[in-house]
Amino acid sequence: MKSVRDVKVEGKQVFVRVDYNLPMDAHGRITDDNRIRQTLDLIHHLKERQAKIILASHLGRPGAGYDERLSLAPVAGHLSELLGQPVLFAKDCIGKAVQSQVGKMQNGDILMLENLRFHDQEKSNDAGFAKELARLCDVYVNNAFAVSHRDQASVTGMVAHVPVAVAGFLLEKEMNAYADAFKNPKRPLMAVIGGAKVSSKLVALENLINLVDQILIGGAMANTFLLSRGIDTKDSLVENDLTNTAGKILQKATEKGVHLMLPQDLIVADAFAQTAKKKTVALDAVPDGWMAMDIGPKTIEQFSQAVAGAKTIVWNGPMGVFEMPPFMAGTCAVARAIAGADAFSVVSGGDTGLAAKKCGVVDQVSYVSTGGGAFLHLMEGKQLPGVTALG
């Protein structure tokens, strides 16, 4: 990929695809602005070089047409506060009015376009829509790793219609983190995989077995692997149709010499609620009507010891129902072990990033990815269309 550092942007209209798909409360207030803050270095870089900066993003999943609840206007206002300068706002992302607004921009100005997904043509990668977006700029910058696994107009489609297309700082950092983790890792290379379902990470697990030295599996997805070994976790979340597949993954790991570790004990509860009764049990001692909610103390000890010996760690998925305080101990113990390891550590996935934040380790791991789906796409051994387009 050519970098934004490699091109002259002075006086040019620079279209930056960002990911400002931010969490908001019921009143439209931003609850976490990390995705904006991750782009400030690029915005400052372009502003210092007197570029005309055009920011484009989606927000949420709007239906047909305009939806005030998903307007990017509040995001533009928040960015203005962070930068300490006005951020102009366009009420659409294409059309004559937008072209006129762009044409009046002065060097160093910043303009945010309205939600790209108010047009269905964005997701369908419509060529005409892509060309309309491309008309707004001299230089295209992809700084939105989190959507780079999407083949959409603002991610791939418009690249063919712009004079120059380059990667932004955040996209570079994300791809470098992936390369450091999987292309040129210090070994042992360990994957710590959790979350609810095997189905969502099946392809990644099958690919990881060819890359890593060790895999730790926790969270509800571990129940399906346990069932493949004949262990009944009673009312725990299990994907019965994937038990054979889970068994094959375990077998393949053995054949490849990959050390795959599953929980040795569990924290179980009599209901899916933080007020439920809970207790620690052996794998074969889950009471009828109870369900696994977290890994147990033996598992915490074994997982933590294994993590301490790794030199590269990729963590994707919590070890239990960490959203409920009574069941976050396992996730936080593993998080602290990862943070304390003498290793290059990458946290990927929205829930995993939130868990890292709740467990207070965000500043202690090597890198926290901004794109769960995109990073998982890479873990599956696939290329990112948004990155390929820049090649």
Image: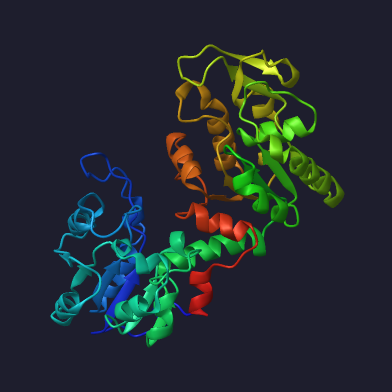
* Residue 71 appears in view: yes
Residue 165 point in image, percent of width and height: 41, 81
Left-right relation of 13 to 268:
left
Q: Which is more toward the observer, 304 or 144?
A: 144
- Judge whether 237 appears above or below 119 on screen: above
Q: Which image quarter: residue 65? A: bottom left
Left-right relation of 318 to 16:
right
Residue at the farthest right position: 255
At 60% across and 61% down in the image, what residue appears?
180
Residue 60 point in image, percent of width and height: 34, 52
Residue 378 point in image, percent of width and height: 59, 60
How many numbered marks appear?
0
Residue at the farthest front position: 64
At 17% across and 65% down in the image, what residue appears?
89
- Judge whether 358 appears above or below 92 on screen: above
At 33% across and 71% down in the image, what residue appears?
16
Residue at the farthest bottom position: 163
Q: Which image quarter: residue 164? A: bottom left
